[in-house]
Image: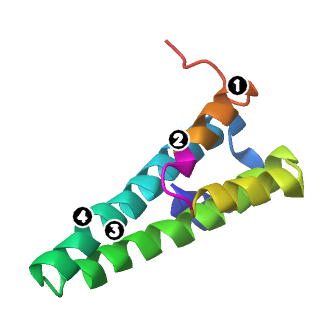
Amino acid sequence: MVIEIVKAGSIGKLNMSDAVNRLRILAIVEGTSLLLLFFVAMPLKYVYGNTMSVPVMGWVHGVLFILFMFYATLVSLKKNWSDRFLLLLVISSMVPFGMVLMDRKLKSMHLVAAPIK
């Protein structure tokens, strides 16, 4: 999703309700990767001695985190969100279950359009 926007140079043509929905999905996926890293990969490493779980899950989480930061910045600039709100997005992506709270915030602010039926 991010690559297609950048590759086509179409950030100006980006449908903002779709962009916010994509941001929400990316946030949940990134947040889930953080939970998997903390609550699955790290116990596998430190309790069961599986030395490959943290590097693999850490790499996956790192890539998702970078994609989320990039896409959040693009959407924030396009939607003219405040710097404070973008900072809240960034902080919530670093806290376990933080993205669930931000997803609720995005919904409550009516930033997401109703899905097309």
In which image quadrant can residue 83 be found?
bottom right
Gap in Å between the C-alphas at discs 4 and 2?
19 Å
Earlier-in-chain disc, 4 versus 2: 4
Q: Earlier in the sequence, mark 3 or mark 2?
A: 3
Q: Which residue is drawn at 81% across and 50% down?
A: 85
Q: Nearer the viewer, residue 80 or 36?
A: 36
Q: Residues within 10 Å of mark 2 (few under 14, many from 20)?
A: some
Query: Dominant secondary structure of the magenta stretch?
Result: loop
The disc placed on residue 85 is: none
* Distance between mark 1 and mark 4 Cα atoms: 31 Å
In screen coordinates, is 82 left or right of 87? right
Magenta span contains residue 98: yes
- The residue labelled by disc 4 is 40
**Marking on residue 100:** 2
Spatial separation of the CA atoms under disc 3 and disc 2: 17 Å
Q: Where does label 3 land, which residue?
A: 37
1 or 9: which is nearer to us?
Answer: 1
Residue 112 in sight here: yes
Which kind of residue does numbered mark 4 sit on? Val
Earlier-in-chain disc, 1 versus 4: 4
Which mark lies nearer to you, 3 or 1?
A: 3
Q: Which of marks 1 and 4 is in front?
A: 4
Query: Residue 108, which numbered label?
Result: 1
Q: What stretch is highlighted in magenta?
A: 95-99
Whether residue 11 is visible, yes or no, is no
User: Label 4, label 3: how many angstroms apart (C-alpha)?
Assistant: 6 Å
Secondary structure beneath disc 3?
A: helix
* Mark 2: secondary structure: helix
Q: Do the residues labelled 3 and 1 touch (CB within 8 Å)?
A: no
